[in-house]
Amino acid sequence: MGCIRTKLIVYSIISLLFLGTNSLSQVQGETRRDGMYLFSQFKDAIIYVLNRQQKIINTNPDGSVKNKQLESEVYFKRIYKQFKKMEAGRNFRPKSLEGVRDPEIIAPVLVTLLQAGRIVTAESQGIINAEKDGTNIKKKFIPAVFGHLVLTRFNKKTNSSMKQTTLGKGKHKQRNDDNRPDLWETEALKKFSQSDWKRNSGYGEFLADSYHFIQPIYISKDCLSCHGLPVGEDAPYGYPKEGYQEGEIRGGISVSLPVK
């Protein structure tokens, strides 16, 4: 399908996240699998992961809450705000996508929401790792871990196929075997590195009975402490740095959705 930037109704989709799952109907005993259902499940997966991580990332030794910015609902609102920033200029129409099943509409917004969550997680490392006494302890709740946990939950709950993936850089490949790209993802990631590829543009294609979509992930300033220079130096979590520079493509977020 080539370069995909069409997200004309993305705000109306993501606004459905705030409607919750109680409004979801049952059709002949089967849970609906439309856009409203999928995005509600994505929000639920994010909240679920953040709730599970509260003891690690947001609890002082005395049991008190460390920072309200890390509380699950507040954290999600920050993700939502980042999403709006990434999709500036769109209008809300809360129920416009109820019943929509078009994967070309659904897929780009799913990956953008996850990207927003990764960005907020990267920006939150200071408060996540800070202790009440001023010390700094790495909690290992980084963007890739956030994404992995959310997608594991989302994929399991919806029987979807969504993942973070990368080709790596130089001799340094994926840090997690689950992130190894398949053949289709490999070719798509190579396209993103070409000089004529429009930045931030994703790539989608119908294959057999599924629609495959992938959107690039770029290295931000917050990523450099783990993935920057010098090449080969131990990163904070034990892996060697790959030597990325700000703005380079790190990889992508891919999703495969059934056509029917």
Image (cartoon, rainbow, N blue to C red):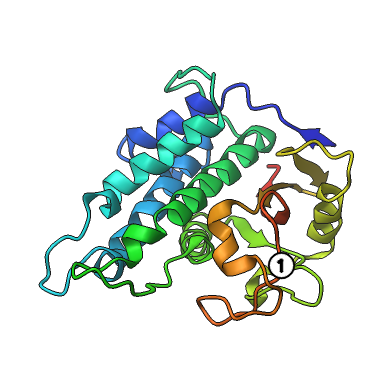
Query: Exactly how many numbered labels are in the figure?
Result: 1
- Within the image, what quadrant is residue 138 found in? bottom left
Q: Is residue 212 above or below residue 2?
A: below
Q: Residue at the spot x=63%, y=66% of the render?
A: 227
Q: Is residue 193 above or below residue 130?
A: above
What kind of element bears circle 1?
A: loop
Judging depth in this view, the residue of 179 and 137 nearest the camera is 137
Judging depth in this view, the residue of 82 and 133 nearest the camera is 133
Q: Position of residue 201 (x, y in %)?
A: 74, 37
- Within the image, what quadrant is residue 175 found in? bottom right
Judging depth in this view, the residue of 15 and 54 nearest the camera is 54
Q: Residue at the spot x=57%, y=23% of the render?
A: 9
Residue 121 at least partly seen = yes
Q: Residue at the spot x=77%, y=65% of the render?
A: 167
Judging depth in this view, the residue of 120 and 227 nearest the camera is 227
Q: Position of residue 96 (x, y in %)?
A: 49, 20
Q: Quadrant of the N terminus?
A: top right
Q: Is residue 221 left or right of residue 229?
A: left
Q: Quadrant of the C terminus?
A: top right
Residue that carries the numbered disc 1 in the rendered image: 243
Q: Position of residue 236 (x, y in %)?
A: 51, 76
Q: Given the image, on which type of amino acid does mark 1 rest?
A: Gly
Residue 25 at least partly seen = no
Q: Position of residue 94 (x, y in %)?
A: 42, 22
